[in-house]
Image (cartoon, helix red, strand yellow):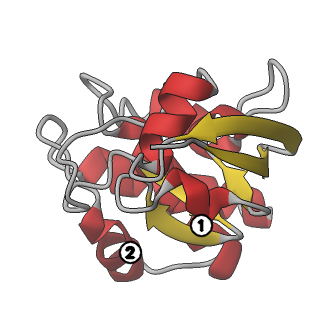
Amino acid sequence: MSKIHVSATVNGDPVEFLTDPRESLLDCLRDHLGMTGSKEGCGTGDCGACSVLVDGVLVCSCLVLGAEAQGKKIETVEGMSQGEELHPLQRKFIEHAALQCGFCTPGILVAAKALLAQNADPTETEVRYWLAGNLCRCTGYDKIIRAVMDAAAEMRGAA
C-alpha cells in the first residue's frame, strides 16, 4: 500500500509526513512527528487521552486518520506552553496537584483549553460535562475541576 504525503500545521509549525492510509493521527503525531504528549488509552475514542484540536475542534486523535490532517491546523499539548512559560492550565494543574500518574493529563489539558476558548467563565457543572469524555483513574476529578476553574478565573483576570 502506498504512503500518503500530508502537509499540515502542528502547534503553529508547518510539518510534512508520510502516512499509511489506515494510520491514525495519533500514531502520526507520535511516530512520525515525535509528539508523544498525546497518549493512546483505548484506541476507540472512549478515554480522551489522545485529545487534540483539529482546526479548533476537539477530537480524539485515535479516531482521525493521519491523512485527514492534510491542510489542517493541529494543536497538541506540546503547543500549550510558550517556551519555558507554562499555560495557566498547566500551572494550575501543578498548583492543585491535579495529576498523579499523568497519563490522562495531556488530553484533559487540551480539552480544558478548548472549553475555555469557547466559554471563559464556565460553571463547575459545565466543566464537568465538558471533561466527561476524558477518563482519569487516579485523581477522582475534583482537583482537576478546581484547577480548570482557577485557570479560567486567572485567564479572565478575576483571580
Q: Is residue 64 left or right of residue 8?
A: left
Residue 150 visible (yes or no): no
Residue 59 visible (yes or no): yes
Secondary structure beneath label 2 = helix
Q: Residues within 10 Å of mark 1 (few under 14, many from 20)?
A: some
Residue flagged by tag 2: what amino acid is it?
Answer: Trp
> Residue 113 or 97: which is nearer the viewer?
113
Q: Which residue is mark 2?
A: 130
Query: Residue 59: horizontal and vertical position, in percent?
Result: 47, 66
Quadrant occupied by the C terminus: bottom right
| Residue at 19% over, 62% down | 46
Q: Is residue 151 above or below residue 93?
A: below
Q: Which residue is mark 1?
A: 114
Q: Is residue 28 left or right of residue 17?
A: left
Q: Earlier in the sequence, mark 2 or mark 1?
A: 1
Residue flagged by tag 1: what amino acid is it?
Answer: Ala
